[in-house]
Image (cartoon, rainbow, N blue to C red):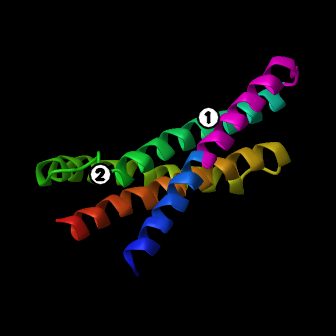
Amino acid sequence: MSQQEAELRRDIFNRTIVRYLEVEEETIASTDELLATATSPMVQQLMLLIKRDSEKHREILHTIQNLASGVVSMTPEEMGEINVLLTHHKQIEAESVVLARSALENTQHVVIRHLLEYMLEDERKHVTMTEQMEDYKRKIY
């Protein structure tokens, strides 16, 4: 890839991340509007879940911007500290997956099932994230 192509791709990437941040902000504002008028506890809970996810996405996008600009780094010592914590955390997340599956298997309530499926998806994602952290350690150091 030529220097010009690389610069173009970086520019497209940066503009995409900026727009993505704007969309997440719009989502947060929209959920706030819905929360202000919703009277149903179920609707309120769903809007809160969406809002919190968008807030997390906003934080992740800021981290991506920092990584892309070379602001964030991790030392081997920090990776060692994380390794100790990851071992225990992986066990906790694995148990959460088992519990969510068990709860799902033992209810037929459609709304409860949807909420549990949402949680199970998050727990699986957490397991994947801890595995990725281990992968970072192997590939970076």
The answer to whether residue 37 is magenta is: yes
Residue 118, above or below 33: below
The magenta region covers: 19-40
- Residue 100 shown left or right of residue 92 in the figure: right
Picture disc at residue 70 = 2
* Residue corresponding to mark 1: 52
Q: Residue at x 76, y 49 (%)?
A: 113
Locate residue 41, reporting x and y percent: 81, 25
Q: Nearer the viewer, residue 3 or 117?
A: 3
Question: Distance of mark 1 from mark 2, alpha carbons?
Answer: 27 Å
Q: Is residue 125 left or right of residue 30?
A: left
- Which amino acid type is marked by label 1? Arg
Which sits earlier in the primary sequence, circle 1 or circle 2? Answer: 1
Query: Which amino acid type is shown beneath numbered disc 2?
Result: Gly
Element type where label 1 sits in the image: helix
Q: Is residue 91 visible?
A: yes
SS for dot 2 = loop
Q: Residue furthest left?
A: 77
Q: Residue furthest front?
A: 4
- Point out the image quarter for the N terminus: bottom left
Residue 141 position (above or below residue 80): below
Name which residue lies at 46% across and 42% down.
62
